[in-house]
Amino acid sequence: MRRARGLQERWYRRRLAPALWPLAPLAFLFYGLAALRRFAYRCGWRRSERLTVPVVVVGNLTVGGAGKTPLVLWLAGELQRLGWRPGIVSRGYGATVVGPHAVSPDADPARLGDEPVLLARRSGLPVWIGKDRVAAARALLERQPEVNVLLCDDGLQHYRLARDVEIAVFDGRGVGNGAPLPLGPLREPLGRLERVHALVFNGAPDHRVLKAVPHLPDFAMSLEPGEFYRLDDPSQRCTAAQLAGKRLHAVAGIGDPGRFFRTLAQLGLEFVPHPFPDHHVYTLEDLDFAAGEVLLMTEKDGVKCASLGLGEAWVLPVEARLPLELIDVLLERLNGRKAP
């Protein structure tokens, strides 16, 4: 766990750390294979499959979380407000089930993935997972024929699923050292952004991204914290002021744990931070430092920790806030291909 966190810390420095140089041959190989795959789809050697409804892909060029899930929830809510009937498709990172599978709000995140369960709970919409997103999307549409637009949480690199809109998300870490995996955090080169329709920055924008695609519309996203709710009884709520003065520990197993810790600090809380890798599967031993004290966590972590029987633990939900002009960008594309 420490090794993985240390590698990511080196990725997100502006300069390439000398300790990473031995990974350069693997990075060139990774970029070469990724470029060959993109070329295969552009030339028709491999075929993208188009669905009967429009598809909106929310993804990123960098590995790890950048705020895609809150953005998908915001888009779903805004599209519903305008009369659309969205469904959500996700790969289901960490899921153990094989093949397409529906995700209910009370599903086991160990079987179906933490983010899909969170999406199902927060949105109330049909959510399906599958490594093969085309198969998952077709299964969703077969079971939920009223759905007339699909939101894909991640999947910018899943070219087999044809899409009508692509939104690329970056958090405050930007593109880090700008190198490809495993030398840096990039899944694809910045030139890939030429094919997306909008950029969303969850934090300060990376000017290297803006310079690469100056013509693209870009939007600032903020994550606004709500009231804390108790992990073992979500009907119990409290404010940051009511937690002040207690001995607090904070855990975050997200792409950038520091983002959660900064939010808590902005709320005026003092705590001991405990960062974990993205999608970390918690055990009681991981959290034994909080025995008899108060634990704070993200909603994504709360989904995974609810069954652990912890003591006093509080979850901080967040809501994405974005300019409504982003919806205008979507509608310009979606209205050109109206769903039946």
Image: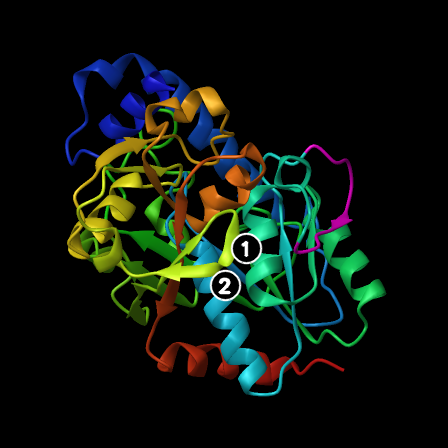
Range drawn in magenta: 96-105
Which residue is found at the position 49% from the left and 29% from the top?
Answer: 282
SS for dot 2: helix
Q: Is residue 36 above or below residue 89?
A: above
Q: Amino acid at mark 2?
A: Val
Mark carried by residue 332: none
Q: Quadrant of the C terminus?
A: bottom right
Which residue is found at the position 17% from the left and 49% from the top?
Answer: 265
> Label 1: few (<14), some or many (≥20) within 10 Å?
many
Report whether residue 163 is seen: yes
Which residue is found at the position 45% from the left and 19% from the top?
Answer: 285
**Looking at the image, which is closer to me, 192 or 204?**
204
**Residue located beneath label 1 in the image:** 153
| Image coordinates for residue 273, horizontal then vertical, percent | 25, 34
In the rendered structure, the answer to whether residue 144 lies left or right of residue 26 reads right
**Residue located beneath label 2 in the image:** 72
Q: Which of the 4 quarters of the picture holds residue 55?
A: bottom right
Q: Amino acid at mark 1?
A: Asp
Q: Quadrant of the N terminus?
A: top left
Residue 181 drawn in magenta:
no
